[in-house]
């Protein structure tokens, strides 16, 4: 009987070649389609392009088991801070734990996306643990420093009046400078004294409402009347240059430096738009404000983010205890005597 030999079907294995740079391109495009903010996309791109550069210089494809571990080790123990910046010069080796953790967080999200698209079989960033961060301090203006800054602009000019009112709004609301300068006339409700901060200008892409004092509300009304912004001009930006263009945060930051230099006394705190946000938060708490209300006003997604202000506001606990001491409140008041007192 004749035997027939059947040829086995040849098994073909398709070797996928992971292209890190191309995958980054596709990932960023997907984020744009998801309507993620330009700032968020820029943050992702900066992190991932730096990783891409390291992989290229070290003959890594980006899908090796230890590729991210090697990159994080380099950033922690070998990279000279600011060595890729044209003007800043530093001899410090290693970047901060906070920067490292942001990189790990961004690359984990990226690799998870690549896995979901079946472009890679595992997530190399999952192999790297987060680093312990030291709690960072921050500068807060004193009341006197706020007064000095508010007195500096020449309110007889448009630019001076504008900057004075911008400082008032920052002190009264705790807004981020990017949020404030993204506001249009329709976002201000002067009747109910509040700002309706739309989702498209916030960091977390969530809308929120911020109350305003009567003083700030009146100042805003003066600015609208000065510029001629009608109440029904809902889409007009409120804070403009003297030429009628949109005003940006970096320009305002430079103006703040000039106002600080012009002040009659030295301002020791870091003079920046964000320092107003710190001042608002601490002052709000010291005046009896609720931390959960502060969280909503600042637009924090987690109370843990607000806790740094709670801890700072409690640094004057001795003074607070002297004012609110239960014992002192129930004891009869004794007139103080001059000179020393001898106990028998």
Image: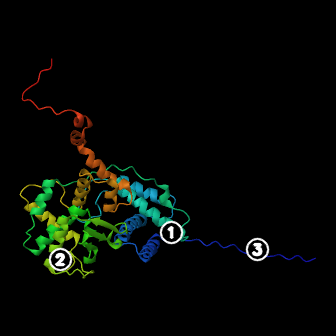
**Label 2 vs 1, first from the N-terminus:** 1
Q: Mark 3 points at which residue?
A: 8
Q: Position of residue 162 (x, y in %)?
A: 15, 72
Q: Depth check: give the residue in front, 66 or 152.
A: 152
Crowding at dot 1, Cα within 10 Å, few <14 / some 14-19 / many 20+, comes out as many
Q: Residue furthest top?
A: 344
**Label 2 vs 3, first from the N-terminus:** 3
Q: Name the residue under label 2.
A: 224
Relative horizontal placement of residue 251, taking residue 24 as reference (left or right): left
**At x 31% / y 51%, what residue is drawn?**
308
Q: How far apart are marks 1 and 3 (CA)?
A: 35 Å
Name the image colouring.
rainbow
> From this viewpoint, is residue 225 visible?
yes
Q: How far apart are marks 2 and 1 (CA)?
A: 49 Å
Q: Residue 114 carries which label?
A: 1
**Label 1 vs 3, first from the N-terminus:** 3
Q: Look at the numbered disc 2 and give the secondary structure of its residue.
A: helix
Q: Depth check: give the residue in front, 151 or 190.
A: 190
Between circles 2 and 3, the one closer to the viewer is: 2
Q: Look at the numbered disc 3 and give the secondary structure of its residue.
A: loop
> From this viewpoint, is residue 241 visible?
no
Q: Depth check: give the residue in front, 222 or 72.
A: 222
**At x 7% / y 62%, what residue is drawn?**
262
Crowding at dot 3, Cα within 10 Å, few <14 / some 14-19 / many 20+, comes out as few
Crowding at dot 2, Cα within 10 Å, few <14 / some 14-19 / many 20+, comes out as some
């Amino acid at each position: 009987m004749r035997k027939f030999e059947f040829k086995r079907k040849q098994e073909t294995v398709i070797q996928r070649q992971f292209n890190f740079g191309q995958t980054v391109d596709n990932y960023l495009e997907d984020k744009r389609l998801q309507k993620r903010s330009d700032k968020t996309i820029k943050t992702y791109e900066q992190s991932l392009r730096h990783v891409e550069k390291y992989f290229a210089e070290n003959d890594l494809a980006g899908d090796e088991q230890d590729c991210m571990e090697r990159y994080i080790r380099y950033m922690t123990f070998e990279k000279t801070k600011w060595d890729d910046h044209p003007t800043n010069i530093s001899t410090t080796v290693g970047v901060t734990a906070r920067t490292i953790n942001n990189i790990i967080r961004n690359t984990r999200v990226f690799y998870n996306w690549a896995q979901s698209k079946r472009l890679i079989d595992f997530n190399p960033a999952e192999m790297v643990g987060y680093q312990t961060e030291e709690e960072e301090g921050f500068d807060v203006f004193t009341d006197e420093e706020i007064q000095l800054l508010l007195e500096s602009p020449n309110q007889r000019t448009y630019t001076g009046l504008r900057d004075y009112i911008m400082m008032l709004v920052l002190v009264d609301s705790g807004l981020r400078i990017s949020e404030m300068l993204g506001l249009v006339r329709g976002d201000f409700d002067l009747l109910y004294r509040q700002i309706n901060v739309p989702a498209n200008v916030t960091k977390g892409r969530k809308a929120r409402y911020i109350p305003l004092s009567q003083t700030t509300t009146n100042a805003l009304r003066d600015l609208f009347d000065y510029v001629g912004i009608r109440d029904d001009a809902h889409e007009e930006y409120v804070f403009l240059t003297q030429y009628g263009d949109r005003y940006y945060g970096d320009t305002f930051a430079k103006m703040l430096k000039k106002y600080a230099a012009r002040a009659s006394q030295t301002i020791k705190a870091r003079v920046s738009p964000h320092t107003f946000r710190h001042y608002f938060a601490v002052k709000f708490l010291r005046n009896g404000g609720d931390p959960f209300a502060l969280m909503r006003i600042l637009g924090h997604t987690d109370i843990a983010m607000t806790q740094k202000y709670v801890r700072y506001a409690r640094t004057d606990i001795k003074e607070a205890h002297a004012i609110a001491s239960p014992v002192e409140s129930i004891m009869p008041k004794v007139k103080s005597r001059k000179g020393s007192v001898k106990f028998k």
